[in-house]
Amino acid sequence: MGVSTVADELRCLIAADTDVVQARQTGRDLAAEIGFSAGDQTVVAAAISEIARNILMYAKRGEVRFTKVLDGTRQGLIVVAEDDGPGIRDVSRAMQDGYSTSGGLGLGLPGARRLMDEFEVVSAPGQGTRITMRKWKRASA
Amino acid sequence: MEVPILKQGHYLIASIQSALSDADLSQLREALIARVGKFRARGVIVDVTALDVMDSFAVRTLRDIAHMARLRGAETVIVGIQPEVAFAMVQLGLTLKGIATALDLEEGLAFLDRQAQGRIDNRQGHGRIDRG
Amino acid sequence: MVKKDAPPPPQDGSASPESTQALLRELVAHLRQNRTQLREEWARRITRAQLLTAMTEEEIFAEATSVYDNYVEALETGTFEALQAYARNLSERIIPRGVETHEVVGIVLLLRDVLARSLFAKYHEDFNKLNRILDAYEPAANRIANTVAVGFVQERERIIRQQQEAIRELSTPVLQVRERLLILPIIGVIDPQRNRQLTEQLLRAIRTNRAKVVVIDITGVAAMDSNVANQLVQTVEASRLLGATVIVTGLSPEIAQTLVTIGVDLSEMATVGDLQGGIEEAERLLGYKVIPYAEATQQA
């Protein structure tokens, strides 16, 4: 059973810090539409906030795309954040997850990854960055 | 969007009403610091009940506020962090270590009162700091 | 099955009598015309094969009617979304009745056979035609069987997950024993799912009960890997963000070691040996003083 898209893609341009708020609000609204728990809506919004802010900080400009998805009985949200910025030199290092509680520093990638179910980074110096993340709705009682 | 800041006795209370952009948060920080100095405030309460997401920038800003307030002799308490927000924060690895947190405005005020009392007791030689 | 050479399919996609579409249409017409007897034949076969024993004959017949109609419609339209939705809906109804996977697969295959047999009966004089009809029918029929079976299995899995979640919810109660004091006794194995649920429940309870102190007792937890230990630390930190002080009790030497290994500063985490001690410490923090009954009555 292949992955099939339920709805069309929604795009948010990221060029100013108010766009970060817009992007995470959009993500939260979509998560709510899918039926994510309040906790998971917040988690999705937080991950989007981190990633969108990264775009702003490092690439100055980019976009975040949202797609609702249905895979068998699983419903989920795919978020793709893309920019043409300087790219990440050492992706694996940026993704290092040291469970650090110092928090708030660096790229926020490991944190965002911990929040989402699936997380993929494609990036190279001079070639921009594309981050794809997915979260699935949990079966609830 | 400006955040309303109220003065209650020796305390300043900033109530965040809705989602704030990075610029709004920076503006709040500047406004609070200015007022702490101006009114010689002894305590600052930032009510984040309405914040549906606390990301790294928000946490950095709150830390800055607490740090700068302390330099000017005021204790800061963050109140109203929602359960879902707290959950997302710890998963992201964001903490407010070293900054007081309380459930709501009432608890925040009680905390500041105890702090103030502790300082008075200290000055009067009682030497007992209430952990609260 | 011996096949004679079938005429090549039309290159220009025109609706010649030989095209798959046309054959399917003929097939669908046949199935609709003979709906009543085919459906009955199928219901008979289901009973003979001793399937769907959890249901009464009337129920079987009613469901058989729906399945039959959906089946024929899928053949006609070539789309399977409606069938998929129906399959899940049907599964949702019959799973609580105790119907099992092999029964659902069984009845769909029986329907496929009943319909195939009727095709044999109708076209047995024109072997060529029979072949072409079957060529059109088989892939569609198999896809239908697949769709229904998979739909059933997915629904079953969803229900199982739901039940597991409910059990987890029941087995991690947050207790309020004093005003502003919550106790969370954790017993048994903690997996990440349960941990997450536990944390969410606790945080909600802190807010609802306006708790100032939480005692998390892990006496009943045998072992903890570093992932779960991390999550425990996160639970403690999240509780602090809501203004609650957390005391962890029942820390075994092994778990203490795990926590140290992952870099937790145990001097930062308030720990007390056992639950009783933890509650007393909590009461102290809350400003309660437990005085002996005699003294209390004297003071009154």
Image (tube, helix red, strand yellow):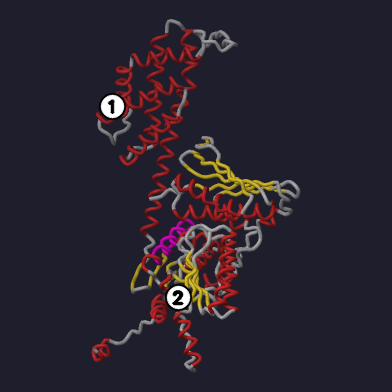
Q: Tell me, yes or no, if residue C189 can be seen here.
A: no
Q: Nearer the viewer, residue A17 or C152?
A: A17
- Residue drawn 52% across and 52% down? A44
Q: Nearer the viewer, residue C175 or B64?
A: B64
Q: Position of residue C10 (x, y in %)?
A: 57, 10
Give the quadrant of residue A107.
Answer: bottom right
Locate the C terminus of chain C and report the quarter of the image it occupies. Answer: bottom left
Packing grade of label 2 (10 A; few <14, some 14-19, many >=20) is few
Give the quadrant of residue A57.
Answer: bottom right
Q: Tell me, yes or no, if residue B25 can be seen here.
A: yes
Is C100 located above or below residue B69 in the figure? Answer: above
Is C93 located above or below residue C113 in the figure? Answer: below
Q: Position of residue C249 (x, y in %)?
A: 45, 74
Span shown in magenta: C188-206
Query: Which chain contains the residue that carries disc 1?
Result: C
Is C294 located above or below residue B55 in the figure? Answer: below
- Residue wearing tag 1: C61
- Residue wearing tag 2: B8
Q: The residue tagged with tag 2: helix, strand or loop?
A: strand
**3D distance between C-alphas at marks 1 and 2:** 74 Å
Is B53 located above or below residue C65 in the figure? Answer: below
Packing grade of label 1 (10 A; few <14, some 14-19, many >=20) is some
Residue type highlighted by circle 2: Gln
Q: Is residue C79 magenta?
A: no
Q: Position of residue A141 (x, y in %)?
A: 38, 50
